[in-house]
Image (cartoon, helix red, strand yellow):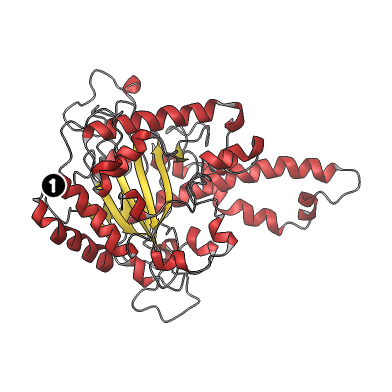
């Protein structure tokens, strides 16, 4: 299991071997500086080994963080699943208050089961086709970056996949091999009819749904969907806010957890993200974990390293040089910070400030092919529900605030490989247009 894998000689060695190699006197050979070219060959071999060890170390760190943080409390909805139209304004304000004060809100039943099922099928079909094509051929890699960002014909790979802040796989669960295939994907979506239909339901604009799409069964209550749209409108500053990301997150059975991270930094809110569950999300699926109030308590994190190894200052932390990463907090023996996890039904959503610390959990589901007749079918972690493949699929939308859109943004941010939107959509769609205004 995971404990045995973490205790294995490979993983334990990975935690120190990189530093040891860097300290060797003949490390210059890694740079390929020798005239005979021997160093170049050595560099290639050692680079491959370093990549494997680095991935294993990263996965070990992610599992340690997940264990340290504990199971987390369930993130509760800020209003009932079905609300009357006259209560939409109050429900949206409850969501705004939750995001403003805690960093995250949950709103239930914002997407119908029928639309969620159709969108899930579309996402997986399109993603598998992209992975199978010559232009997006996937090889073993520590992150999706190798398939989604670098290389490819005419930049096609960069159009459909974004980097994922996670090692591709935890291993086979039995200690036999590390990272044999990628198991977590960030797939950029086209503005297909089913995508428009889902956006229309979530944001409360019935006119956005396509007449060619199957009808929702049962229909989504307009009040619930509108509550999400109104909350986004209030948080993002109105109709001039911009569609910043449009994608799906997919984690396969065996996917490693992520380390806690934020999507953006800065003293002011600039991005708000919605995750919509396209199937029920149980603890076994590796639900998204959120650390409440961290959107406003780590404002000092301003560089790229902090996005990947985020720190926050504890109340009694007077030493600015003290390691305040989760690993550092663990090392000091401090208790884990409070966290909540998004255990969702199909169509439920989370809405969060992108500065907030969050992470995807390890997907411990098993596909039906691996289940025996003796496995539980009464609600246990391997229960087969609508998602009989064991995958967790989240449809997500990120909105950039009108204020941030009005400010000149550097090319580095606009071309961020972690930004998940197809080039033909970037910079062209406002929140108002998504809501039919």
Q: Residue 255's spot in the image, x, y percent?
A: 42, 38
- Secondary structure, mark 1, is loop
Q: Is residue 62 visible?
A: yes
Q: Considering depth in this image, is 218 or 297 the residue closer to the camera?
A: 218
In this view, the residue farthest toward the front is 437
Relative to 383, does residue 196 appear above or below in the rendering? below
Q: Considering depth in this image, is 379 or 373 the residue closer to the camera?
A: 379
207 left or right, relative to 296: left
Q: Is residue 337 visible?
A: no
247 left or right, relative to 106: right
The quadrant in which residue 219 appears is top left
Relative to 58, does residue 328 appear above or below in the rendering? below
Q: Quarter holding the N terminus?
A: top left
Q: Residue 267's spot in the image, x, y percent?
A: 41, 73
Q: Considering depth in this image, is 319 or 428 the residue closer to the camera?
A: 428
In this view, the residue farthest toward the bottom is 318
Relative to 134, does residue 107 appear above or below in the rendering? below
Q: Residue 294's spot in the image, x, y percent?
A: 34, 66
Mark 1 is surrounded, within 10 Å at the Cα level, by few (under 14), some (14 to 19) or many (20 or more) other residues, namely: some
Q: How many marks do you count on the picture?
A: 1
413 left or right, relative to 293: right
| Residue pointed to by mark 1 | 81
Please tell me which residue is depicted at 21% across the width and 32% down the height of the picture: 216
Q: Residue 73's spot in the image, x, y percent?
A: 22, 54
């Amino acid at each position: 299991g995971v404990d045995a894998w973490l205790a294995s000689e490979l993983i334990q060695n990975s935690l120190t071997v990189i530093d040891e190699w860097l300290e060797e006197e003949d490390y210059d050979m890694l740079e390929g500086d020798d005239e005979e070219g021997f160093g170049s060959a050595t560099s290639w071999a050692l680079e491959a080994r370093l990549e494997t060890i680095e991935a294993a170390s990263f996965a070990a760190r992610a599992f340690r963080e997940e264990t340290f943080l504990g199971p987390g409390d369930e993130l509760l909805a800020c209003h009932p699943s079905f609300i009357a139209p006259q209560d939409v304004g109050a429900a949206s304000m409850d969501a705004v208050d939750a995001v403003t004060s805690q960093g995250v809100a949950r709103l239930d039943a914002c997407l119908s089961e029928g639309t969620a099922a159709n969108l899930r099928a579309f996402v997986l079909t399109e993603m598998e086709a992209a992975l199978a094509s010559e232009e997006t051929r996937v090889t073993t890699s520590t992150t999706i970056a190798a398939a989604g960002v670098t290389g490819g014909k005419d930049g096609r790979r960069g159009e459909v996949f974004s980097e994922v802040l996670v090692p591709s796989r935890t291993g086979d669960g039995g200690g036999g091999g590390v990272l044999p295939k990628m198991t977590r994907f960030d797939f950029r979506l086209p503005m297909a009819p089913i995508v428009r239909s889902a956006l229309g339901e979530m944001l409360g604009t019935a006119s956005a749904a396509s007449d060619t799409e199957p009808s929702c069964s049962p229909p989504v209550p307009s009040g619930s969907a509108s509550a999400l749209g109104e909350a986004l409108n209030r948080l993002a500053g109105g109709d001039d806010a911009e569609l910043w990301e449009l994608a799906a997150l997919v984690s396969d059975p065996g996917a490693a957890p992520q380390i806690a991270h934020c999507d953006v930094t800065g003293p002011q809110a600039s991005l708000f993200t919605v995750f919509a569950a396209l199937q029920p999300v149980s603890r076994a699926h590796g639900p998204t974990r959120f650390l409440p109030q961290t959107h406003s308590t780590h404002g000092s994190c301003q560089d790229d390293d902090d996005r990947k190894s985020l720190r926050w200052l504890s109340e009694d932390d007077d030493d600015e040089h003290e390691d305040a990463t989760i690993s550092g907090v663990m090392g000091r023996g401090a208790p884990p910070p409070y966290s909540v996890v998004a255990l969702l039904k199909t169509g439920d959503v989370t809405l969060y400030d992108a500065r907030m610390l969050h992470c995807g959990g390890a997907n411990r589901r098993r596909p039906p092919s691996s289940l025996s007749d003796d496995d539980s079918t009464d609600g246990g972690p391997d229960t087969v529900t609508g998602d009989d493949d064991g995958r967790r699929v989240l449809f997500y939308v990120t909105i950039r605030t009108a204020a941030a859109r009005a400010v000149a943004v550097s090319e580095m941010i606009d071309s961020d490989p972690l930004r998940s939107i197809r080039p033909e959509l970037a910079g062209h769609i406002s929140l108002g247009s998504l809501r039919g205004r």
